Amino acid sequence: MNCLGRHLLVEFYGGSTAVLNDVLQIETSMLQAAQSAGATIITSQFHHFPPLGVSGFIVLQESHFAIHTWPEHGYAALDLFTCGFSVNPWIAYDFLKQAFQAQHGSALELNRGQLHLLETPKRDLQQPEKVTPLASTDPQEQRLVWFSDRNDNIALSIRHKGSGVFREQSPYQTVEILDTFEYGKMLVLDNIIMCSEKDEKAYHEMLVHVPLLTHTAANILVIGGGDGGSVREIFRHSQVEQVTLVEIDEVVVKAAKSHLPSLSVALDHPKLQLVIGDGIDYVTAAASQTYDLILIDSSDPVGHSAALFTPAFYQQVHRILKTGGVMVAQSGSPQLNQPQFRNLYGNLYRIFGTSQVHCYLAFIATYPTGMWSFAYCSKAGPHPLRDFDLQAAQQFVQDQPLAYYNPGMHQAAFCLPTFVSKMLTVDTAAIFVES
C-alpha cells in the first residue's frame, strides 16, 4: 500500500431504531468491532441524547472509530480510520452492519497520507523530559459513557461505568439502573433521573420528616415511590401503625429490591401494604376520611404520571384525607417550568385553601436546576412551622442516621427565594385555569 492509513466513511440505512438509540449496545458493538478488526483499544466515550440519538468514539492505537446515529430514521454515520495495515476496517464494517441490523450500507474508502507526497526530512527526535502518568485504579476508568437528563433547553450529564446494571421495558416505561462514578447507582425512568444513592436522602428525608414532625400520623398512604426510599424514612417514626404504598410499575420495585438495597430496605416491612396498581384508581375507590397523611411521591408530570398533577386527582386526595390530616407532594422545580409550577399551586389553593398550602424547598444535585419543591397541604390540620415540635425534632435527628434533614433545615426550607414567593402570592383566581 502506498499510504499511511485507510479511512472508511460509512453509512448504514434501515437499522433497528431500538439498537441505534441504545448507548450501551452501541458502545459494546463498536468495541467488539474494533477488536474483531484487530485494533488495540485505548479509550472510548459515548453519549446518548434523549430522546433520540447517540454519538461516540473509540481512540485506537491505530487511530479511531466514531459514530453518530439518527434512530428515528434507522440511520447511522460512521468514521473508521486505521493507520498502517495490521487492522482491516472492512471487518468492522461487516460486524457493525449486522449489529445495527442495517438493511443496507455503503462505504467510501480513502487512502490517507499518500507516500509519494510525503517529505521525510531529518527531525530531532530527542525524548522530552519524562512525565509520570496518572495512575488508574479502575479498569473501566478509561471508558467515558455519559447519560443525559435533558429537555429542549438544559441538560445534566452524568458519567457512568458503561455496563448496564438493570434495564427492562415495563408496560409503562423503560426502567434502568446505571452505575455512575459520582452518584453511585442511579434509577432512571424513560431517560429521567429519579434518584441516586448519593443524594436521594435529600428528597426522601424532606418529603417524609417535614410532615411527620408536625403531625403524629398513624395511617399513611404513599402514591408512587416504588424505590422504597419514602417508606424507609416513614418507618423511622415509631407512632406509624400502617403504611400503604401504591406503585403502578412492578418493575420499579423489582429493580430497587435487586440493586438499590439502601432504598428498598423497608419494602418488606410488616407494617407495609404494597399495592401494585394505579394510584388514581386506588384513591378514587378509597373511603372518605381514611388517612392521616398522604405522600405523593410521583415522577415528573409526563406519561402515566401526568394525571397525578390534575385538580381531579387532588380533589380525591382531599376527600380521603382525614380532617386534620396533611398531604405532601413533590411539586417540581420552581425554575424549570414556571407556568406549570404556578398552575399546580393555584389548583392546590382552590382545593385546600390558600392559607393551608405551603411550599418548601430542598436541594438535590441530580434533579434539573438542583432546586426542588414540595407542597405541604393541610386539611384544617397543623401548620408546618407554628406546630413544629422543635425538641422532638432535635431528639429525632440525634436518634436517626439522617443525611439532610435537621430542625434548622425544616424551618429554613419554608424561607423561599423572592421569585418563588412572587409566583405563589399573585391573585391565583385570576391566572390559574384547571387542567
Image (cartoon, helix red, strand yellow):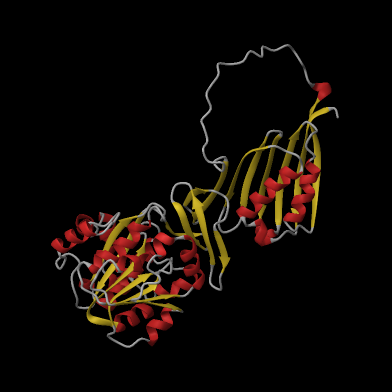
Q: Is residue 185 left or right of residue 24?
A: left
Residue 121 at x, y percent in the picture = 75, 13
Q: Residue at x 68, y 33 (%)?
A: 61
Q: Give the quarter of the figure containing the C terminus.
A: bottom left
Q: Is residue 101 above or below residue 131?
A: below
The residue furthest front is: 270
The residue furthest right is: 1
Q: Could you say which quadrant of the image residue 335 lies in?
A: bottom left
Q: How many marks?
A: 0
Q: Is residue 111 above or below residue 202?
A: above
Q: Is residue 78 above or below residue 364?
A: above
Q: Is residue 67 left or right of residue 210?
A: right
Q: Is residue 253 left or right of residue 315?
A: right
Residue 425 at x, y percent in the picture = 24, 64
Residue 15 at x, y percent in the picture = 73, 58
Q: Residue at x 73, y 46 (%)?
A: 33
Q: Residue at x 47, y 56 (%)?
A: 186
Residue 236 in view, yes or no: yes
Residue 334 in view, yes or no: no
Which residue is at the front of the view, 412 or 40?
A: 40
Q: Could you say which quadrant of the image residue 329 lies in?
A: bottom left
Q: Give the quarter of the figure containing the N terminus.
A: top right
Q: Is residue 202 above or below residue 36?
A: below
Residue 303 at x, y percent in the picture = 50, 70
